[in-house]
């Protein structure tokens, strides 16, 4: 789903959303010297900017308010200060809301209202609980939607529950595989629609320490699945020197060939980490910032390695 925002001036609105709101630019399309389309992104979520024509109008032109957009950030107070200094129209200052987030409001150049927020633990009387709600999905299969409802004693399991965000994980982010022949692996995954996106060389340093191998040397190759939304990747590790055929029995040994780890994308890595620790899950690393992501390993069933991933932009703000 891609929301479309009507704009009176696509370029000006694009620049405002990038420079003031902090979204990522998805580019502008020009035709005959005129900007006819724009795109901004919040992580893997896209917004299309369309000129206000053909029946579309802006809230400012219609002089009515019909809704708004909620954007979660890591530090709502810092975001508020930057927006205020930049001259944004502030609707209200940061306030702790009883539904579990601290938020403030701003209005963009075309009158769209944005609610910038940082989630925190909501009161005990609220929790996000999946409730069956029949809708048509891909292939007309029923889906389930989540609904905020009051919690009662019958709905609690006795285990610590995740209340800080609406879900523990958002989606699978990537699978990492250790390979002996990277070109052959790349060729195989290209058959499935993956394309080479990024190559990095690991030669000791923080990434090697994070992997539990301080002297590790490897090529780290990212393959992105074309057309996938949300984004999904296969990440290849080609070690130098190549590991022996059997470097150890325990699957947490990340120098083994084959499966290395599965990574899950989350909105708040600190909150999810606390949730896992509260439920007795073993952490396998400290947190690391790497290629626009905050990362942390933890151990799954049968000793497999799993990973939390929170995407961030170049300034460190959550995406």
Image (spheres, rainbow, N blue to C red):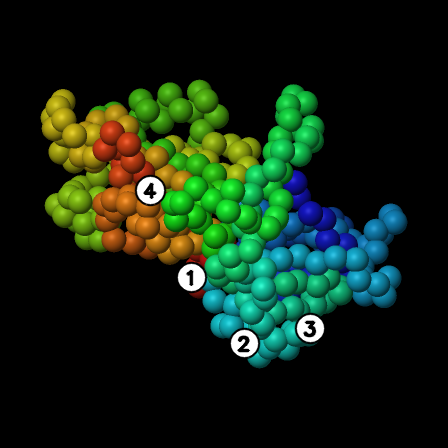
Tell me the tag on residue 291: none
Quick one: label 4 or label 2, which is nearer the N terminus? 2
Residue 265: x and y in percent read 43, 44
Q: CA distance from mark 2 to mark 1?
A: 16 Å
Q: For residue 286, say whether it is visible.
A: yes
Quick one: label 3 or label 4, which is nearer the N terminus? 3
Q: Which residue is mark 4?
A: 307
Frontmost of labels 4 and 1 is 4
Q: Badge 3: few (under 14), some or many (20 or more) residues near its Cα, within 10 Å?
A: few
Which residue corresponds to the image point at 84% horizontal and 63% vertical from the top-left? 64
SS under mark 4: strand
* Marks 3 and 2 close (CB-CB < 8 Å): no
Q: For residue 19, say whether it is visible.
A: no
Q: Which residue is mark 2?
A: 81
Judge from the rendering whether residue 35 lies leftward or rightward of residue 315; answer left or right.
right
Q: Which residue is mark 3?
A: 91
Quick one: label 3 or label 1, which is nearer the N terminus? 3
SS under mark 2: helix
Frontmost of labels 3 and 2 is 3
Judge from the rendering whether residue 30 lies leftward or rightward of residue 315; answer left or right.
right
Residue 105: x and y in percent read 65, 68
Q: Badge 4: few (under 14), some or many (20 or more) residues near its Cα, within 10 Å?
A: many
Quick one: label 2 or label 1, which is nearer the N terminus? 2
Judge from the rendering whether residue 141 lies leftward or rightward of residue 283; answer left or right.
right
Frontmost of labels 3 and 1 is 3
* Marks 3 and 1 close (CB-CB < 8 Å): no
Residue 206: x and y in percent read 22, 53
Judge from the rendering whether residue 306 lies leftward or rightward of residue 158; answer left or right.
left
Q: Residue furthest front?
A: 153
SS under mark 1: loop
Quick one: label 3 or label 2, which is nearer the N terminus? 2
């Amino acid at each position: 789903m891609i929301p479309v925002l009507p704009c009176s001036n696509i370029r000006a609105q694009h620049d405002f959303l990038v420079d003031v709101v902090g979204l990522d630019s998805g580019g502008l399309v020009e035709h005959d010297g005129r900007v006819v389309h724009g795109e901004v992104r919040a992580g893997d979520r896209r917004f299309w900017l369309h000129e206000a024509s053909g029946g579309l109008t802006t809230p400012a032109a219609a002089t009515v308010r019909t809704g708004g957009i909620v954007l979660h950030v890591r530090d709502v107070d810092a975001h508020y200060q930057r927006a205020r200094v930049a001259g944004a129209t502030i609707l209200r200052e940061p306030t702790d809301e009883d539904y579990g987030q601290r938020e403030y409001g701003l209005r963009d150049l075309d009158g769209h209202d944005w609610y910038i927020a940082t989630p925190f633990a909501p009161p005990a009387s609220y929790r996000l609980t999946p409730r069956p709600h029949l809708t048509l999905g891909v292939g007309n299969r029923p889906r389930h939607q989540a609904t905020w409802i009051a919690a009662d004693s019958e709905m609690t399991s006795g285990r610590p529950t995740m209340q800080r965000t609406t879900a523990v994980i958002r989606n699978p982010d990537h699978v990492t595989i250790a390979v002996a022949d990277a070109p052959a692996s790349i060729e195989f995954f290209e058959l499935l629609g993956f394309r080479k996106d990024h190559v990095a060389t690991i030669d000791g340093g923080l990434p090697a320490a994070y992997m539990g191998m301080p002297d590790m040397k490897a090529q780290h190759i990212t393959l992105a699945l074309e057309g996938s939304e949300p984004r999904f990747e296969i990440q290849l590790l080609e070690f130098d020197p190549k590991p022996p055929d059997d470097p150890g029995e325990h699957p947490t040994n990340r120098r083994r060939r084959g499966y290395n780890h599965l990574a899950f994308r989350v909105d708040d890595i600190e909150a999810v980490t606390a949730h896992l620790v509260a439920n007795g899950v073993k952490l396998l690393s400290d947190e690391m910032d790497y290629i626009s992501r905050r990362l942390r390993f933890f151990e799954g069933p049968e000793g497999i390695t799993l990973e939390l991933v929170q995407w961030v932009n170049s300034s460190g703000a959550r995406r």
